[in-house]
Image: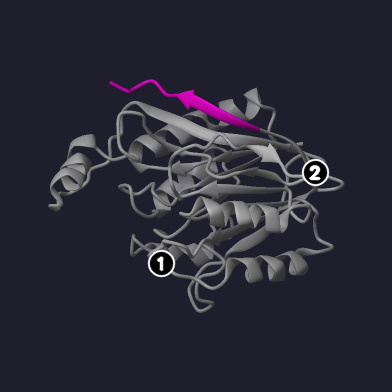
Amino acid sequence: MRVLFIGDIVGKGGLRAVSKYVQELSREYRCSFVIANGENMAGGAGLNERGCKELFKQGVNVITSGDHVWDQHGVKNFINGMPNLLRPANLHVGQPGKGYGVYNIPIGGKICVINLMGRVFMKLQGDCPFQLADKIINEVKGKTKTIFVDFHAEATSEKIAMGRYLDGRVTAVLGTHTHTPTADEQIFPKGTAYISDVGMVGSSESILGREIEPVLHRFATGLPKRFYVNDRDVVIHGAIVEFDIKTGLASNIERIKKPVPNED
């Protein structure tokens, strides 16, 4: 069985690209379930209800998020009504939404998706993701052996540590947040698929999805300037994980990259 995991969706261009091509990608790679990190879909920071509904309509099964989850104020009003929309599980327990769920795979079987956030170099702080991972895995034991973790973190070392920590206990640990795909996809010794970052769905002519000039200005001068999202020249980055539904262990992980034509 295969799962398609799509990296951080940035702005209208990223949202448009995933909405248009997710079904095509699912068919091409023969995937039975789709997970997408949508935390930057709304103007480059946060999520909105309309965008989430569009992704679900077009074939995304679960949307994960990260440190920008609360950037759009309206999220707090609809997240509880969307069980397939996750926020980091290690945020304060009193915050709305949930950090993991067990879902039906359309062709049969169940899958648990866990959304965790790192703590190293992250402005939005949460509880220990390692301890919470242990707790959630124990809670879903007996429900399914297929467990996918979106680890939204800045530090590569923290991401690798999480992958090694969960090796053999989850199907995959897939890194998000830095928007730049890494070339370290692998199957760890006990059967967990891993990659430090799957990359973004955003413009190839940008700096992490933002217009180049304002970002260069800030780095070169130290002076503030508003960052705008570039919605053109979008590339979809993601990963395909193949696994055994009976054991929950992975046999292959493959990076994907799909340039999307501009809409004139």
Identify residue type, mark 2. Gly
Q: Dot 1: within a 10 Å radius of its alpha carbon, few (fewer than 14), some, or many (20 or more) residues? A: few
Q: Position of residue 156 (x, y in %)?
A: 52, 50
Task: Using the image as rendered, state which of residue 120 and residue 253 is in the foreground.
Answer: 120
Residue at image location 37% in from the left, 55% down from the top: 46
Residue at image location 57% in from the left, 42% down from the top: 60
Q: Residue 34, located in which quarter of the rendered image?
A: top right
Q: Earlier in the sequence, mark 2 or mark 1?
A: 2
Region rendered in magenta: 254-264
Residue that badge 2 annotates: 108
Task: Using the image as rendered, state which of residue 77 and residue 5 is in the foreground.
Answer: 5
Residue lying farthest to the bottom in this orientation: 94
Q: Position of residue 218 (x, y in %)?
A: 18, 47
Residue that badge 1 annotates: 124
The circle on residue 47 is: none
Q: Position of residue 215 (x, y in %)?
A: 22, 43
Identify residue type, mark 1. Leu
